[in-house]
Image: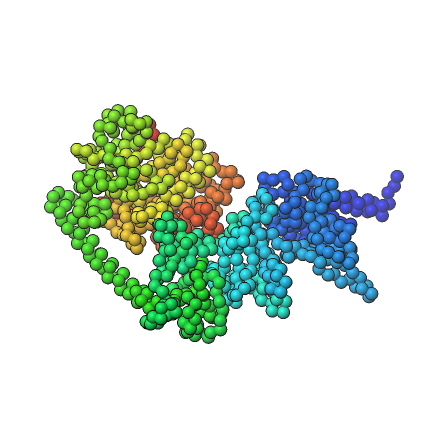
């Protein structure tokens, strides 16, 4: 039978229509006759957003959601039936008979509805806009044939956890209606989680995140340009974020203006399931989301330090009382529970006058710079700081004030809560204090300067006396350093710690801290130090495996009697590590100082050292990426404890793979503290004429100039991190024709955008590659040539955990020029005493 041209085209059209209906509806609107089934989607007119059914990761439940159309994967920005998913593929999104948009399951039960009452005309439609907004409209025809579309409902009025362009988050002060973001329970469960974000419009407007009904984070007041409690927020033009007060409508809301942003970029804010507000921007070049968390530290948690407490993330501990205040519960503060806050040390004059009729000098104000102001600010009109101060002094209830040109005068009555010290940004906060406390504050600087000068002179004199006494006893040997390890000098009297003094010092310590072992017990434990039990050998002496009478396995370091250097390191290690307790530091059980014997007793690490796994062709297969990353994080936490969280600020100076021990579960523990040095509370750097450590791990400023600091350990950590990722020793490139070091190799691959070639082949699984590449990026930041460019360990740990999402571009690393290694030998300079492998112990597998 012959088919005419018209019939042919009709048939072709029907075939195409059937095909489109089975996979994707090529329109942006749902009508009473056009609906979406399980496998179908609609796309916004400009192709930016898509709407359809989806299943979250690790879930078979089906939800109706909106996601970016052109971005790989599904970045879900809104979910309709977040609390009532369909359990199979029979769901449908459609216009119901009453004109509402509904989600129904296979039994036609309504799982979700726009729930608009009294729709006059059921001839409605739902359209997906290019901003990701799903809008339900009522269509009505006027007498002249024109169609007027009225908005009945829109998804932007019922957001999920994502804040998109033109969306408004805020409150209507007249009706009490609030529009908030609500976190998901998890990535696999979009139902409402514990956190919500909205605008607090009482007083000076600000944004707040609530955990349940309690504040979890606040942005600080809006000054018509930024929220002053977000130090990194420099302008609304950065991301288009703006706060608008509409007195006519009675609304206060935050929105992202289209005019203030580049629409060619995909930018969004997301409230995640842990309560973090994250700004995300799609990077076309890297084909990934780049994220930046608004909250960066513990101090961003609301009221972390309690009333009248101030939080400083760069200090340890992070909480201190404001000047003129003291902890309300010293016991709780000693346990780092700061929630009770602080109380005033001296009552204000007006309070004393009101209660006892006393007279005295007037109260004053102590200025604190770069502060996040407390919550519950009270606004008043004042033209400048002076006028604001006068207003506060006239009110006995006023305990603090601040002035911002974009806001005006802010003052506070009652308790001051959620105060934070910023490293940059913030404003000046003026704390009201009694006159006597102001006088103390003014004298603090003089007292500190005087104390530092006197303390420095005292330490210098004591060190000189100790040195002369030592020289008189032993004589000055060629090449020995004139500067001793800190543990050589008693902190209390400047007395040199000989073996007898050290033994007496240990006896007077608490028994729980350190045990003095008897030589005969250790001899029995090691079968008279049988060579069969030998674990390793180093500059310190030999290390043996032992078993105490109670069955406990131990590792025994036995000082070589001929090791002059080992005696100093022995004393240093005892004094340093005996005061430390951390799960990522090897535990010192005790020591033995008996006759001519000097030994250190440690917990036994069944898997010995990291290098035995990392650089062994067979054992390295046991270290998959999860284990390696766990080891990297553990070493980072251990170093952070040494630098910031322990009672002492300790620089390890010999961090390397052989000094990382592994327990039976491959948990890392930093060992060998013989080279460690203690820095004073405010001391950032020290210089030595005796450079000790292991080449390849030592930082350039330490090798060349003898300067060491926290950043020296950061450099060593960076080298170690790159070794863990690549499975290659840093020193294995010494005779390489193309690369002079592992750092040089990494840097060239970074610049050639070939970092995948750097990763050990056994780790090349696509799903873990982004995390590995991030670690390489962090490693390169750690090994930058100049100390000021390297991050602190606190920052490194945050980078590894992705708390800091956007990483800076690394600068040129150290030791990437061959002449540095070949032409310059620091050991030839008389001011240094060097070794290419000065290390107390190297553990070798038997």
Q: Tell me which residue sits at (59%, 59%) in the image.
A: 169
Quick one: which residue is furthest to the right in this view? 1
Residue 168 x/y as whole percent? 60, 60
Q: Does residue 473 appear in the picture of this structure?
A: yes
With respect to residue 485, does 438 lie above or below? below
Residue 419 x/y as whole percent? 43, 59
Quick one: which residue is furthest to the front in this view? 356
Quarter-of-image position of residue 253 = bottom right
Coloration of the structure image: rainbow
Tally the marks.
0
Q: Nearer the viewer, residue 575 or 463?
A: 575
Q: Quadrant of the C terminus?
A: top left
Q: Nearer the viewer, residue 366 or 284?
A: 366
Residue 14 x/y as whole percent? 80, 45
Q: Tell me which residue sits at (17%, 47%) in the image.
A: 495
Quick one: which residue is furthest to the left in this view? 472
Quarter-of-image position of residue 444 = bottom left
Q: Is residue 227 left or right of residue 35?
A: left
Q: Is residue 276 left or right of residue 336?
A: right
């Amino acid at each position: 039978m012959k088919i005419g041209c018209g019939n042919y085209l009709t048939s072709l059209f029907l075939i195409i229509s059937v095909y489109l209906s089975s996979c994707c509806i090529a329109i942006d609107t749902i009508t009473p006759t056009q609906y979406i089934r399980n496998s179908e989607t609609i796309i916004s007119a400009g192709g930016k957003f898509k709407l359809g059914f989806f299943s979250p990761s690790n879930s078979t439940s089906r939800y109706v959601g909106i996601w970016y159309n052109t971005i790989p994967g599904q970045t879900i920005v809104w979910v309709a039936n977040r609390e009532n998913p369909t359990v199979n593929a029979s769901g449908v999104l459609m216009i119901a008979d009453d004109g509402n948009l509904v989600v129904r399951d296979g039994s036609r039960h309504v799982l979700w509805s726009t729930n608009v009452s009294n729709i006059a005309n059921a001839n409605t439609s739902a359209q997906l806009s290019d901003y990701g907004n799903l809008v339900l409209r009522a269509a009505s025809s006027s007498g002249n044939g024109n169609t007027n579309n009225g908005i009945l409902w829109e998804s932007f009025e019922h957001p999920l956890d994502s804040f998109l362009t033109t969306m408004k988050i805020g409150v209507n002060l007249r009706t009490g209606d609030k529009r908030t973001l609500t976190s998901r329970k998890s990535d696999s469960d979009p139902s409402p989680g514990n956190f919500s974000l909205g605008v607090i419009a009482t007083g000076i407007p600000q944004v707040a995140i609530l955990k349940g009904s309690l504040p979890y984070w606040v942005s600080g007041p809006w000054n018509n340009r930024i929220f002053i409690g977000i130090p990194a927020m420099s302008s609304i033009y950065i991301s288009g974020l703006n706060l608008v007060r509409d007195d006519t409508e009675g609304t206060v809301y935050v929105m992202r203006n289209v005019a203030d942003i580049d629409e060619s970029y995909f930018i969004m804010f997301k409230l995640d399931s842990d309560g973090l507000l994250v700004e995300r921007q799609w990077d076309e070049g890297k084909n990934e989301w780049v994220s930046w968390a608004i909250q960066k530290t513990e101090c961003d948690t609301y009221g972390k330090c309690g009333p009248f407490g101030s939080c400083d993330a760069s200090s340890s501990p992070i909480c201190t009382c404001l000047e003129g205040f003291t902890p309300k519960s010293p016991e709780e503060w000693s346990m780092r529970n700061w929630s009770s806050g602080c109380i005033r040390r001296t009552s204000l004059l007006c309070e004393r006058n009101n209660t006892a009729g006393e007279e005295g000098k007037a109260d004053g104000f102590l200025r604190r710079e770069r502060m996040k102001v407390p919550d519950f600010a009270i606004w008043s009109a004042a033209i400048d700081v002076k006028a604001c101060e006068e207003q506060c002094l006239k009110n006995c209830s006023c305990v603090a004030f601040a002035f911002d040109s974009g806001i005006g005068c802010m003052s506070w009555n009652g308790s001051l809560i959620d105060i934070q010290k910023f490293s940059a940004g913030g404003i000046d906060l003026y704390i009201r204090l009694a006159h006597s406390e102001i006088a103390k504050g003014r004298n603090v600087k003089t007292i500190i300067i005087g104390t530092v000068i006197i303390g420095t002179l005292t330490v210098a004199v004591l060190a000189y006396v100790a040195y002369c006494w030592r020289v008189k006893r032993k004589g000055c040997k060629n090449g020995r350093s004139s500067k001793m390890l800190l543990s050589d000098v008693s902190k209390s009297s400047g007395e040199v710690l000989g073996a007898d003094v050290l033994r007496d010092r240990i006896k007077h310590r608490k028994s729980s801290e350190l045990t003095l072992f008897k030589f005969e017990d250790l001899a029995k434990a090691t079968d008279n130090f049988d060579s069969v039990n030998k674990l390793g050998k180093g500059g310190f002496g030999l290390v043996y495996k032992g078993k105490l009478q109670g069955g406990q396995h131990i590792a025994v370091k036995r000082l070589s009697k001929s090791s002059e250097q080992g005696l100093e390191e022995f004393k240093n290690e005892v004094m340093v590590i005996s005061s430390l307790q951390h799960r990522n530091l090897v535990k010192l059980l005790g020591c033995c100082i008996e006759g001519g014997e000097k030994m250190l007793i440690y917990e036994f690490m069944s898997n010995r050292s990291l290098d035995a796994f990392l650089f062994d062709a067979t054992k390295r297969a046991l270290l998959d990426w999860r284990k390696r990353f766990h080891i990297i994080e553990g070493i980072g936490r251990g170093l952070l404890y040494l630098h910031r969280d322990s009672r002492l600020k300790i620089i390890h100076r010999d961090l390397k793979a052989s000094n990382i021990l592994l327990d039976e579960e491959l948990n890392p523990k930093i060992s060998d503290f013989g080279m460690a040095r203690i820095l004073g509370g405010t001391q950032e750097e020290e210089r030595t004429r005796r450079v000790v450590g292991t080449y390849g791990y030592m930082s350039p400023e330490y090798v060349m100039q003898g300067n060491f600091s926290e950043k020296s350990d950061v450099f060593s950590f960076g080298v170690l991190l790159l070794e863990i990722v690549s499975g290659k020793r840093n020193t294995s490139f010494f005779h390489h024709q193309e690369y002079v070091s592992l750092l040089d190799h990494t840097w060239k691959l970074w610049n050639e955008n070939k970092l995948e070639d750097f990763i050990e082949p056994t780790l090349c699984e696509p799903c873990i590659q982004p995390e590995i590449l991030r670690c390489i990026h962090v490693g390169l930041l750690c090994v930058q040539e100049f100390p000021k460019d390297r991050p602190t360990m606190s920052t490194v740990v945050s980078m590894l955990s992705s708390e800091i999402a956007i990483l800076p571009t690394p600068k040129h690393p150290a030791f990437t020029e061959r002449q540095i290694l070949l032409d310059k030998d620091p050991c030839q300079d008389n001011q240094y005493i060097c070794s290419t492998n000065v290390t107390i112990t190297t553990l070798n597998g038997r």
